[in-house]
Amino acid sequence: MRLVARTGGAVAALSLGLAVVPAAPANAAVVHIGCNVEELRDAIDTANGAGGGTIDLAPKCTYTLTDANTVGSQNGFPAITTDITLKGGKRTVIERSSAPGTPEFRLFQVNAPDGELTLNRLTLRNGSTPFGGVALVFGSISVISSQLTGHHATIDGGAINGQPGSTITVTSSELVKNTAGSAGGGISSLGAVTLTHTEVSRNTAGFGGAVAVSGPVTFNHSKVNGNTATGAGGGGGVSLLGTTGTFDSTDVSRNKATGAGADGGGILGSGNSIINLRSSWVSGNSATDVGGGILSQQELNARRSTVQDNTAGIQGGGIWSGGTTRLDGTKLKGNRTTAAGSQGGGLFAGSGTATLIRSEVSRNRADGTGSDGGGIYEQPGSTVTIDRTKVANNHPNHCAPTGSVTGCVN
């Protein structure tokens, strides 16, 4: 099964990983283990049979897996079927061996309906699989004070892949330098995702360089920085596929959508997605085609936020709006489009309505021969309304076509 969303003619899809999902028991205790992979595997088996529990791993230990849990398995450890916590300490590492000839496998699989895995104070690295280098999740996973790095998924979810009905929660952690061939260099999910005080940086995927989701996602006080989407699907930082993305006090910066015709350098909201920004920053992102900072096909709500120094080739250096956009107390500054005949350095309204209240549109540029609407470009069929909003110092003009935006004087 594939979920498909379209933007700019490109097709973006999250895939279902296929696996057998057994049922689970309930309830157990705390076990301390030494620095030994087989001991950890046995402890997980025992916890599954006992209904769950906490496994304390050795500090200053690297658990290096050289093979999968069983012959033909894609998992390094027994599948999680109950509520299990793996608790590390100072410099506790779990990794798939990087030695030549090591078979490809992920570290964990979390099964529904009762599988709940908590990873606490761990470094996890080098998983390699079609879906989720750290974990393929049918149940729920919580990552706390941990680093997930160097994982690769040939299809979706470089570090974590969530299946329908799954829950992914990441707190005070880092997802760094993970890759996916298709969706979500850090995370891809068809379920719910919440990231709090977490950094997702320098990940790469075909689309959704950091995160690609078709379930609801919330970023709280987090950073999505320096990620890259290499394919036409776009979404250098975050790709929303017909879902709601909430960004609260979050920084989405320096992400790139580099594929031919790619859109949404920072955030891409395709289909009927809703993007909510509260006290957040979208800055220094770029897209080959449209929506350097944000592309929104359906709905964008930004309050007390800043969209600054983003770049698009053709339209909407800061924001490309194709539905309903409302900016309240929001700054649209220093954005630009670069191609000849480009439009809307700050904001491009392609259809629907865009309303700016107590906001600022300044120092935006539509560069390139014959370009227009340095601040705002209102395409015929769309309506832009400005209320108590400063529009100043844009190039070559503030609003285009001339007279289209009431109250905007070039």
Image (cartoon, grey):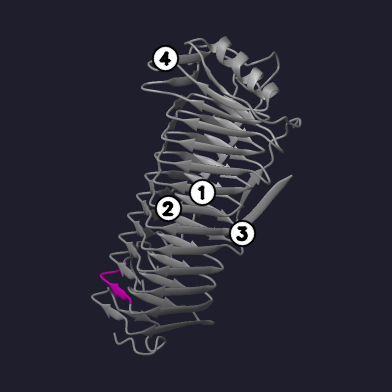
Residue 291 percent location from the top left of the image: 44, 62
Q: Earlier in the sequence, mark 1 or mark 3?
A: 1
Q: Earlier in the sequence, mark 1 or mark 4?
A: 4
Quadrant, the C terminus: bottom left
Q: Earlier in the sequence, mark 4 or mark 2?
A: 4
Label at residue 194: 1
Q: Is residue 190 above or below residue 387?
A: above
Residue 332 percent location from the top left of the image: 33, 69
Which residue in the structure is indicated by mark 2? Answer: 220
User: Which residue is found at the position 69% from the left and 31% from the top?
Assistant: 26
Q: Does the magenta stretch mainly form a helix, a strand or a loop?
A: strand
* Mark 4 residue element: loop
| Marks 1 and 3, how far apart at CA | 17 Å
Q: Amino acid at mark 2?
A: Asn
Residue 9 percent location from the top left of the image: 60, 58
Which circle, 1 or 3, is nearer the viewer? 1
* Mark 3 residue element: loop
Which residue in the structure is indicated by mark 3? Answer: 242
* Mark 2 residue element: strand
Mark 1 neighbour class, 10 Å CA radius: few under 14, some 14 to 19, many 20 or more: some
Tell me the magenta residue range.
Answer: 359-366
Q: Earlier in the sequence, mark 2 or mark 1?
A: 1
Number of residue marks: 4
Position of 52 compared to 217: left or right?
A: right
Position of 157 compared to 409: left or right?
A: right
Residue 31 visible somewhere in the drawing: yes
User: Which residue is found at the position 49% from the left and 36% from the top?
Assistant: 143
Which residue in the structure is indicated by mark 4? Answer: 61
Which circle, 4 or 3, is nearer the viewer? 4
| Marks 4 and 2, how far apart at CA | 32 Å
